[in-house]
Amino acid sequence: AKMKGRNQYCFYRQEMHQEVAEKLALEKALHGAINKNEFILVYQPQVNTHGQLIGFETLLRWFNDELGQVPPSRFIPVAEEAGLIDEVGYWVLDNACRQLKIWQEEGLPSLFESIAINISPYQFAKDDFVDTIKKVIEKHQIDPSLLDLEITEGMLVEKISSVTEKMWQLKELNIRFSIDDFGTGYSSLRYIQHFPLTQLKIDQSFVRDLSGDSSNSSIINTIVSMASHMALSVLAEGVENLEEKVLLDQAGCSRYQGYYFSKPLEESMASQCLHENVRF
Ligand code: C2E
Ligand code: CA
Ligand code: CA
Ligand code: CA
């Protein structure tokens, strides 16, 4: 038993070591990623109940020679810990706004509402965050009401007064705010009414619970009805099949994003869908 314990301990230590080494390798490679043009943005369609395009969520992709394609779920936390998220986040903002300007000039279809951009809490916490947003809007001459900043529940729960203040300053420019992964954090619907929000994004874990044996729509019903009282729109994420879409319709949801409609698209494909006013 003693031997086994020690082996397990060694194994555990080895695993920890591997994890640390991997993070260091990621961090090292991330330092050069922007200059080496290793990032691209992809755009996942957001649609209404008829499958018409209402917006795109901007998602970051990283291709590195040695590491291959690294998913954002792995490198974003490393960028945050290493203090690189500002630079990466600015690259995303700058490039998403440059693309938005192109689409804006080409005359977006009338139903199109916004481009969503994920904002890390670390970015938002920076003193100059509001200025940065204002400058990037100015630089690309975009309509601020076409910008939808996705933030996390955690940022609101921590109740930092500067967060509220920054949100109101941005709200004055007509910028939209969506709460990402809604329902997975600890914020109550009563609590979030103090923030200038536009939309709640229902986390895909709740969408998964809708169909199948252990069907459970009560959380979604609650979110949808409370949101409508607060005049917020609700978008369901991670919709993968028609059954889920129909059940979400029944729950009163009318905005969707997920593989059932479309995977995230590269810029040329996203542009084509916009121009042809594709129905998903
Ligand atoms: P998220 O913001 O919740 O983004 C949604 C994720 O779900 C994306 O993964 C998307 O590709 C995936 N997805 C979309 N539809 C479906 C579906 O039907 N089924 C399933 N299973 N998944 C679906 P992705 O692109 O790998 O991004 C993962 C996370 O990384 C994002 O979660 C977000 O938190 C973060 N992230 C991505 N891009 C950025 C960025 O530019 N900045 C920051 N700060 N975070 C980002
Ligand atoms: Ca998101
Ligand atoms: Ca999400
Ligand atoms: Ca299911």
Image: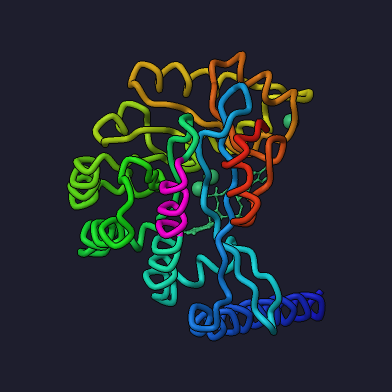
Please state the total of marks drawn on the protein image. 0
**On the rendered image, what quadrant is the N terminus found in?**
bottom right
| Front residue of this view, candidates 22 and 169 | 169
Give the side of residue 216 with respect to residue 122, left or right. Answer: right
Question: Is residue 183 among what the camera can see?
Answer: no
Q: Which residues are magenta?
A: 96-107
**On the rendered image, what quadrant is the C terminus found in?**
top right
In magenta segment, residue 105: yes
Give the x, y percent position of residue 151. Answer: 39, 48
Quadrant housing residue 130? bottom left
Give the side of residue 156 with respect to residue 212, left or right. Answer: left
**What residue appears at the point 46 percent right and 30 percent down from the top-left corner?**
110
| Front residue of this view, candidates 215 and 200 | 200
Is 243 situated above or below 117? above
Give the side of residue 23 with respect to residue 31, left or right. Answer: right
Give the x, y percent position of residue 224. Answer: 48, 20
Q: Residue furthest front?
A: 106
Q: Main secondary structure of the magenta part?
A: helix
**What residue appears at the point 81 percent right and 76 percent down from the top-left corner?**
4
Give the x, y percent position of residue 158. Answer: 30, 49
Quadrant housing residue 138? bottom left
Give the x, y percent position of residue 118. Answer: 45, 53
| Front residue of this view, candidates 95 and 178 | 95
**What residue appears at the point 22 percent right and 45 percent down from the top-left corner?**
164
**What residue appears at the point 47 percent right and 40 percent down from the top-left corner?**
108
Question: Is residue 42 among what the camera can see?
Answer: yes
